[in-house]
Every structure is written in C-alpha cells, then in structure tokens.
Image (cartoon, rainbow, N blue to C red):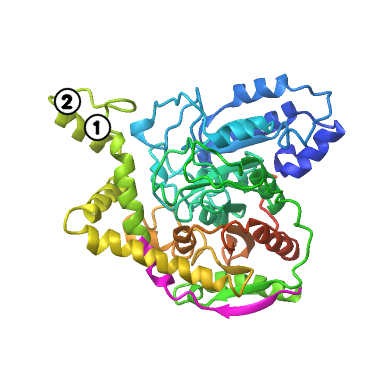
Amino acid sequence: MKLAHLTITQAQDLLLKGEITPVDLVEALIDRINAYDENINAYITVLGEEALEQARSMKDTQKPDLEKHPLYGIPIAVKDLICTEGIKTTCASRILQTFVPPYNATVFDALKRAGAIIIGKTNMDEFAMGSSTENSAMGVCRNPWDLDRIPGGSSGGSAAALAADMCFGALGSDTGGSIRQPASYCGVVGLKPTYGLVSRFGLVAFASSLDQIGPMAKDVRDTALLLNVIATYDERDSTSIPREKMDYLKDLEEGLEGFTVGVPEEYFVGGIDADVENAVRGAIKLAEEMGAKVKKISLPHTEYGVAVYYIIAPAEASSNLARYDGVKYGYRYEEAKSLMDMYCETRSRGFGAEVKRRIMLGTYVLSAGYYDAYYKKASQVRTLIKRDFDEAFKECDVLITPVAPTTAFKIGEKTDDPLQMYLTDIFTLPASLAGIPGMSIPCGLDGNGMPIGLQILAAHLNESKIFRVAYNLEKAIGFERKELGS
C-alpha cells in the first residue's frame, strides 16, 4: 500500500482503524516531494520539519474525532498567495520573495482547527496572473502527466502537487478559472465556490470583485470535505455571505432523477479540440442515462467574456498592486537616487512581465477619457453575462461545459502570444464574472494521454447541486488517475 496515493477519505479510514498515524502520512509525502518535485516544481516552500513536528504532537493512539477535527492528521498544501503567519508568502513574485505575514488567512486557521497538517506552499503564476504557471519568479511548474507540458494556472502548483500525490488536498484561488483550468489539465477535481462563500481575508488581492479561494482534491468527496471546512462566514471580509453552515457531503449519494442539465451552445464552438468535445458530450450522455433531462440553452453574451474580464481584472489589479512600492514591505531597490527612482526601479525589477502588462492595461482603462469607454462598458456587459446565467438557471439545475478548448499545451507554446494564452480561459471566465460556482472534474484523456476536464456550473450558493452531479458522473466515468512512479 502506497500511502501517498490515497485520497483523504481513504487515509481517514486507516487513521480511524489505527493502522497508520499522521507521521506515516507526512513521511510518505516528504518522500514523494524529495523524489519528484525537483522536476515538477510544484512547491515554493516545503514545510517538512514543521509538518513532522505537528504530526508527532498528535496523539497517535487516540481515535480521531472527525466531527470536531474533520481533517485530523491530513497533510494539505496551500497556494502561496494565502497568508500564513511566520511562513513566507511570496505570490511567486520577486517583490514578495522574503515577505513573512504577521497573521493567518481565515481559511488557513480553518484548516488548522480542522486538524490539517500544512505540508507546503505551492507554486503559481505571479500574483495569480496567468494560465500556465510559467509566470512564476520561482521557476516554471510542470505537469506530472507530461513534464514538457504546463499544469495550467494560476493554481498550477496545487494541481500538480495533487496529480503527483505530493499532498492529499490543496487550496487554490480562482479569479478567472485558476482552480478549474489547472484541475482540468492535471486530472484532479477543483471547485470555484460562489463569490463570498469562502472568506478572502488573508488572500493577497489580484482582482477583488473576482478572487475566490476554493478546494482542490483527488476526487469529488474529498473536495466536498474541504469545502465543509473552509466555507464559513467571516466578518473580517465585507463580501463574506452570512448563511447557515452547509454539509456538502450530505446529498452526494442521491441520483440525478429529476435534474435538468443545460448544455450552452456557445461552449461548443470552432476551435475546441475534438477529443475535448467528444469526452464532454459523452459525460452529458451519461448524465442523461442516469435520469437527468438534457436541455440545449443559450448564453448569448459568452463571446464577450474574455474582453470584459481583461478590462475589469487588470483595472482592479492596477489598484491592488499599487501598494508594492518598496516602502513598507517586500523588495526595495536600494541603489535609487531619489524617492521616485526607488518607486520606479522597485516595481520594474520586482514585477514580472505579465504583471506589468496587466498593471499598464488596468491603469489605461481607468484613466481619464477611457474609463467610460472601457471600464464602465465592461461592467455593464458583466451584468448582461450574469443575467444570461440567471435566465438559464430558471430552467436548469446545472450547466455542463468543457473547462478549456484544449488539453494542457507545451511549455513555451503560448508565452509569446498573450491573446492566445488568455483565450485558454474562454470557458471559465463567464462564471467568474457572474460570481457563480463551478467545478472541474476529469472526464477522459485525449489522443496524447492528457486529462480532459468537464465544467459543472450552478446558480449562486448551489454548490450542493454541483457536488451531486459531479459525484454521480465521477462514478459513471471511472476516470483512472495516473500514479507517478507507481
């Protein structure tokens, strides 16, 4: 039995039986990380000694109380833009490469209270700006299925760590697809929750009206378990939604009888890879065979999603990243001859090319004379995109679409063409703009043996419907994860 290959649920079962201890799980992961991460580069910071110390402090002979501590003894990875007191939080940027936060993010505290052991901080596109994890100042992250290919982004490190069995669960963040797209490319499960369901306190901001922390895991059940832990109201986050605590494991076993699955015609267009379309349509057929009603629908403003996102997100980024000026924390250019020189040199040297591109785009669309033409108009079209989804969910319980037009592409393939890189998120951006939940689950392999993800979307705060459909489809599809080094 190879402990690192277990799911959270399987590991919990062995912990409850007393057959293994938290130390066994941590040691198994440290061995995996030592063996494989030199080539994958999924982690920026590995907390091996700290994780072992925490594992040893747990009472190995005492039966875990999973009611109080639902992640007791389970090693979890955290994307490196979630603040961790006393542990570096770099955002994969030179400008924050030595930054150690003085406080924890709300989700980090939630993991600790649940009994989780933090195994490390994962690689990402700098400040979450990217779709491939090639924009990391800490080095490119690689896809465990094929080391010549990207793992997706910006939560590529979290997805790669899961796919390579170097953690049992992970947290990512999703602004325009940054959980769902890497989950699709790496053959794991990832959920972007409803905007406001999970606290953003302690999440380093990229685009504040879009950013959302979410869970990633090896299967649907584990993803639901993680969401149970992190979905809590937080008065420190003004966008946090006050609501009763939900149990997302509760309805997993229910079937799909009576469900209506919408299939948006705009998501099956020219440019989509044939293997991707066939795999997703095959999953839709499985849902129909399980009793769901399948209905063709239209989301007419989908085509504007990319343009709207790349106005709104850079505009918010240009404001959020103004704080990194070399004065209070982070990197500072020490040889400056004046204050203005220090500002300019610090930001020029500290930020990578993609971050600077988005800051300039955002500053431009917010500038006098262009605000109404770009930012205001984009905000209006964003409302139309949200209305499209509102109308669709009057007729459908969930929507099923591809996550991305293709599977993972080769490293370096799109770095010289930002527009082509941006278009990889064409199917995930609209849901982010509307603030609705979306999940990626694996649904097959393409001709090169790379994973294909399907996306399940639902109305605001309807994560339970997504989990129910995802769990049933996961069982029916029977996707087999690649076990690196097995």
Residue at 48% in and 65% down: 427
Q: Amino acid at mark 1?
A: Thr
Coordinates of residue 435 in the picture (x, y in percent): 49, 57
Residue under label 2, please give it: 336
Residue 372 on the magenta segment: no
Q: Amino acid at mark 2?
A: Ala
The quadrant of the rendering that contains the C terminus is: top right
Coordinates of residue 269 in the picture (x, y in percent): 47, 76
Range of magenta residues = 291-308
The answer to whether any part of residue 6 appears in the image is: no
Residue at 70% in and 24% down: 55
Q: Which mark is residue 346?
A: 1
Comparing 330 with 148, the one in front is: 330
Q: Is residue 99 left or right of residue 272?
A: left
Coordinates of residue 468 in the picture (x, y in percent): 71, 60
Residue at 23% in and 27% down: 333
**Which secondary structure lies at badge 2?**
loop
The answer to whether any part of residue 314 appears in the image is: yes
Q: Is mark 2 in CB contact (under 8 Å) with mark 1?
A: yes
Q: Is residue 306 above or below residue 14?
A: below
How many C-alpha atoms fall within 10 Å of the one at disc 1: few (<14), some, or many (≥20)? many
Coordinates of residue 287 in the picture (x, y in percent): 70, 71
